[in-house]
Image (cartoon, rainbow, N blue to C red):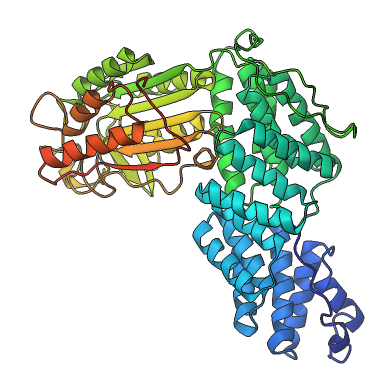
Amino acid sequence: MSRLPVVLALLAATLCSAPCSAQSRSQLGPLCTTETTPADQMVDACTKIIALKVFKGGQLATVYFWRAVGWNKKGDYAKVIADTTEAIRLQPSQVVYNLRGSAYFDKGDYDIAIADFDDALRLGPPSGIIFHNRGNAWRGKGDYAKAIADYDMAIKADPRSAFSFQNRGISKEALGDLDGALADLNQAIRIDPTLPQPLIQRTAIWRARGDLDRAIADGTEAIRLAKDKPPANIMTPPNSVLISGYTHRALAYEAKGDYAHAREDYNASLAITASDAGSKAVQATAKVRLSLVTDAAAPMPRDAPPPATQPAAAPASQQTGAAPALSPAPSPAPAVRGSRMALVIGNGAYAHVKALPNPPNDARAVAKSLRDIGFTVSDGVDLDRAAMQKMTRDFLREATRAQVALVYYAGHGVQIDGRNYLIPVDVALKPGTSMTEAMIDMDTIMAGLDDQVRTNILIFDACRNNPMAQQVASAGSSRGIEGASGLAAPSSLGSGATLGAGTLIAFATAPGQVALDGEGANSPFSAALSRHLGTPGLEVQQMLTRVRAEVVSATKNKQVPWSNSSLLGEVYLAEK
């Protein structure tokens, strides 16, 4: 979300001397190298110039750069990377590294993006735009301190950079500094009242504070602005603003109990073509939430109760007419804010694959430990597909009102084409295109919980194995179906992993390894987990460290639990 530096003194003079029969020499150059040229015309003109084969070195690098700009407008990041790579080969430059880094960012390849931005800064001079873009990549990785440091540099270079204030506010929000986030977002709106993005981000703060009407108002204004004047900034992925605006407003409608308007907004979000990784993650959430609000009867719309404490007053907004004015009145706290909910499932009585004796015991032990520390628990054992799907969907629907949502599953799991699936007890694992439809997609659960105003903890005592293996019904002491390898590491935790309170996902064993069912009444992992869940004052990641040590010792290094966290502060399941 930054403006690309305009490259001056390009190919106009040289093009006049080049032969070209299909189009006049005076048209090709400006069409290729003017930032406002429509994407298709820009790509076409630059392609024709390249086909002339009369340019070399820096001039040819410039043409590849501008064709990459055209691809970037179209959201074709693979072609952006290909053309900028060729431009760098011909003549490295700061602007080309910046564009390629931005394309890697939009693809979700944050480490490569940071490397490109580092190279751009090394080529100098210092650039607020590149600091801003590198800040975005740090934010994508969940390193908010480094992101804020880069946004500080960007703002120092350009105090009128609305996007830098906006994204610094998002980073502050992720670290729990809602007042600092609100101040930065308000400043972004004051600098440029026509930008919809700061309003969209402000909706999340209002939802976190329970002020749903204000969230809906900001979302509505953002959508109007995005429709009236689509973002012209070529570094803003196509359609990303509207996708985000509709989904954020839908979450506010859903939290208020207005399912009809929520469905309309989720449908609107999904009807738009997404090009970048962030927008695709947002749409994954919209798809799950749409399904949930479509199946459910709408609750009575609720109004949030008055707050127990008075939050800091929000600074007044300039009366621009483009954004809803802020009043100094405190925002109400959300209804049921602070509630903690858990879904606990243990499947062992499998009809078509190896039965497991311990998952029901594990689920009961974990459910008891969670209830003892104040969680509201929905639990079930030996669930068939219909029951497991209903319980999961009911939980996801209710979790919109929770501050902490925890999911625990024990039983069989499989990994197919990089996605993890949890196995109901009645599923027959047979080859076929509809096989995965009979299972519960773990990514769907994660997408359904993806919301920056909630802490999510997902714990899986399960294995990934090839369901087509001949050993599918073989006996053994592990929770693997084939007995070969474990659940895959998730390729992404979704947007919720980089926003809000964050997400922690834990597996009973490392990626590619198996989880043992155990010789006693419980698996080694779940036995240790249920013992440590209720330890007062034990931070959740410290708890998992203790669980890991116990499991490694009990299994003689055969099983090493694994976790991936984007939690942004200390989370205590049992009170200090």
117 above or below 530? below
As drawn, the residue found furthest toward the left would be 519
Asked if residue 106 can be seen in this view, the reply is no
In front: 197, or 53?
A: 197
47 above or below 401? below
44 above or below 318? below
Side (left or right) of 436 relative to 87: left
In front: 350, or 211?
A: 211
- The image shows residue 117 at horizontal and vertical percentages of 60, 65
Name which residue lies at 66% across and 62% down: 130
Side (left or right) of 15 relative to 281: right
393 above or below 132? above
In front: 527, or 520?
A: 527
Q: Quadrant of residue 85?
A: bottom right
Name which residue lies at 77% across and 51% down: 161
- The image shows residue 250 at horizontal and vertical percentages of 66, 27
Asked if residue 473 can be seen in this view, the reply is yes
